[in-house]
Amino acid sequence: MASTFEPIPARGPRADSVTRFPVMTAARSSRSILPGFGLSLGFTLAYLGLIVLVPLSAAFLKTAGMSAHDFLAAVGSSRVMAAYRLSFGASLAAASVNVVFGFLVAWVLVRYPFPGKRLVDALVDLPFALPTAVAGIALTSLYASNGWIGRWLAPLGVKVAFTWAGVFVALTFIGLPFVVRTVQPVLQELEPEIEEAAATLGASRWQAVSRILLPELAPSLLTGFALAFARALGEYGSVVFIAGNMPMKTEIVPLLIITKLEQYDYRGATAIAVVMLVSSFLLLLLINLLQKWSRRSLAI
Amino acid sequence: MAPSDLFALASAPPTVPHRRRARAVQPRATRDPAVARWLLTAIALLFLTFFLVLPLAVVFVEAFSHGIGRYLSSIAEPDALSAIRLTLLTVAIVVPANVVFGLAAAWAITKFKFAGKSLLITLIDLPFAVSPVIAGLIYVLVFGAQGWFGPWLIAHNLRVIFAVPGIVLATTFVTFPFVARELIPLMQSQGTDEEYSAVTLGASGWQTFWRVTLPNIRWGLLYGVILCNARALGEFGAVSVVSGHIRGETNTMPLHVEILYNDYNITGAFAVASLLALLALVTLGVKSVLEWRQAGSA
Amino acid sequence: MSIEAHNIRKRFGLFTALDGVDLNVPAGKLVALLGPSGSGKTTLLRIIAGLEFPDPGSGRVLFHGDDVTDLPAGRRKVGFVFQHYALFRHMSVFENVAFGLRVRGRRERPSDAAISERVHRLLELVQLDGLAGRYPSQLSGGQRQRVALARALAVEPKVLLLDEPFGALDARVRKDLRRWLRRFHDEIHLTTIFVTHDQEEALEIADEVVIMNQARVEQVGTPQQVYDRPANPFVYQFLGNVNVMRAPALAGAARRPGVAAEGAEGQIYVRPHDIELTPHASGGSGAAAIVRHIHAAGPHARLIVEQVETREQVEVEISRSELAALGVRVSDLVRLRLRQAHSFEEDYAI
């Protein structure tokens, strides 16, 4: 696509007119005997534009109308910065924990037999399927000081609900399946021979795992981490109940956006949202690159 | 994974059974010591118990904590029933719309060659990268009182935000990629040979689609529908922004759960939540069956 | 170092992979384990390597007379090359070869300089010295196979075990590499066992061939021994094309008197190139047959002839010059004579 916009030495009027409309020529040149190309692509683009692209552009256009000073004031206030710190910090912590335990769960599911394995395997997707509000009130009730778990933590002086730890617990819940589901298929497809090769070369079991298996799985672990992190950054429903939502302390960015909206501060809300959108898109790009990298380095 | 697999979410490809010869007994050289196996399994199961089993269990225990009578009356309450109706209405609009889109997008992307295809695939995945709250916000910016079409809508006495259309639009946005991203890799792997054969045998475009393509993708389509449906039922953040929380009018089930919870009607909140949790369990069940089915036929 | 295996049994669930197998490999030899797939040859190799273990109470594995049955793979000092190489994809060629040295305990581990020197020497030995910095995905199949070999040799194994070493390569590379392996073995004289299902490969490069079928060893011997004196019909058929004929067909067809026992029942085995054709008109001994087909493409001519008396079809292989001298065409009459034939019935041995 990019090459379209570079000057192309004109070889004649026809060549010139062809290079100018790449989409049309491509469609024309791949004359398929199947019908419906125009209809299906047209509908796809229209639907994509109306549902996704036009509304998303509204956020960017709204901020584009702000002066740099206003934008920085909206985004840089101490309350907003505190929310960014909490959202990024807790998401990072939760995604890290998920890498460790997600890998462990994937490992156990792939490698070890135990009764009820199919059930456990199916249950791993619960955070995908359970509405976030339900997860939110369930976790809050578990970790409140009189809850099933909270009552054991309270005597130890550990408070989870309505603190930073509560945000972390909710984000861990929501991100768990990402790591499991990215690592599991890779682990399953891994040739047993590479571990055997390590064994015949004199490596201990631990050396085989740490020097051969983990590096082989690194791209999928990183991808799972990035996916869990990206999801945690934007998560709202499971967090608002358990967080306590105190400004400067336990207020996450999505909640702050809603608060601003309720105060009719549309510009402030949009400015904060644009920063989040840009971070998410960068993460998306990173995930794409990670997957390309893992495909290339592992292609044999 | 295809680049489109970013934000694979629930649609992580169903695990494929080991293609290599199955060894009845794992060779000892790569088997971990029994202590390690036992310990690691125990830790993993303990972690899952705390993070998955207990949250699920507490929903049902709390819902029935004051007996089944109270449970039933919480659900039969008019506001609860109207929330259930609104949620079902939303799902009934959103899921078919995204199915049609998913089929059209997958047909265009997998059966034809055109420039910018990978960009299109990436754009289809975009909603997965957007926080639900922001998904709600952008519709407020477009259709809200101060938004692009706000004055026009007010002039014509139409409401989108704080009304059902806004809820439907926001839900459509967050569930946008589910069906398409399930179908695209599936149809890509199936190629176009069968469609070409059908057309050369004289079938029309629609006949080809209904009799050849659709039967081939029906399980993948069902899988996408299940995931789309689950998310549409439970969407909270995006809907929360555009709904206005008007009881009996613009409250979906998850929003109703929130209102009851904030009113300290804990049992009522968990009663409605238990319905959603039950639907989640059904989703997981159907999803697993579809995956085993696929693993079995692969 | 010699390798012995005694009475090895191995079952996977209901499937018997090895049913009381014995094996004796003298030090310094290149031995082929040859058999169809499912015959147990790879399992036997993996048991020798310590990647699998014989069923409890069955057999023993001895290296140079020492019992290693219970030693894990890492302590047997074997070099193992996998069919699909099993290279570590995230490591360069250099790091792959160095792996076995780097995982040693601190006391036995060579210095970095020593490791580097040994790796480069090995890469030279397998003719890959320029490619130390490449990754496995950047190599051809034959190159990957040699990296796998260098990696196995880096730990200075006492025994080299190769599982279908050329199985995943295309025909050309396969031929080059197996000759290279033979020369290579002649240089380093490491006791080597390789598994293959390709009889041509086994007969061409092995000092000794062990033919396996259905979890048992059928015959052991030099390539010439097993080819010329197959122990049973399976070996005979597995090692090349063969005509199976009813014994009465021999009446008059054999040149040597002992071969043709008039009226004897049972079957005899004759290789296509052990049959001689003469023009029918020339008279003399030999069974009459009609030429049904002539395939003259390639170095040899193959003819399908049908015996007049029994109507059995027989494949005959002669050189193209012989065919020219014979001057036969389809539907001509010829006479068959057997230079060599086998029977596996007790009273019928040749």
Image (cartoon, rainbow, N blue to C red):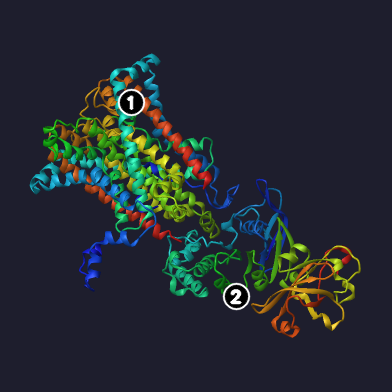
Q: Name the residue that disc number 1 marks.
A: A141
Return the x and y of residue B46 as percentages of the image width and height: 44, 35
Q: Is residue B295 above or below residue A30?
A: above
Q: Secondary structure at mark 2?
A: helix
**Of C66 and B210, which appears nearest the observer?**
B210
Q: In which quarter of the view is residue C60 placed?
A: bottom right
Q: Name the residue that disc number 2 marks.
A: C179
Comparing marks 1 and 2, which lies closer to the viewer? 2
Residue drawn 37% across and 15% down? B66
Is residue C219 visible in the rendered image? The answer is: no
Is residue B169 visible in the rendered image? The answer is: yes
Return the x and y of residue C155 as percentages of the image width and height: 54, 65
The quadrant of the rendering that contains the N terminus of chain A is: bottom left
Tally of numbered discs: 2
Circle 2: residue type: Arg
Q: In which quarter of the view is residue C33 placed?
A: bottom right
Return the x and y of residue C89 as percentages of the image width and height: 45, 60
**Of A51 and C164, which appears nearest the observer?**
A51
Q: Secondary structure at mark 1?
A: helix
Image check: C35 left or right of B47?
right
Residue drawn 76% across and 70% down? C314
Check contact, mark 1 vs mark 2: CB within 8 A. no
**Of C286 and C270, which appears nearest the observer?**
C286
Q: Is residue A37 above or below residue B40?
A: below
Circle 1: residue type: Ser
Image check: C11 left or right of B256?
right
**Of B49 and C243, which appears nearest the observer?**
C243
Q: Is residue A135 above or below residue A268?
A: above
**Which chain does tag 2 point to?**
C
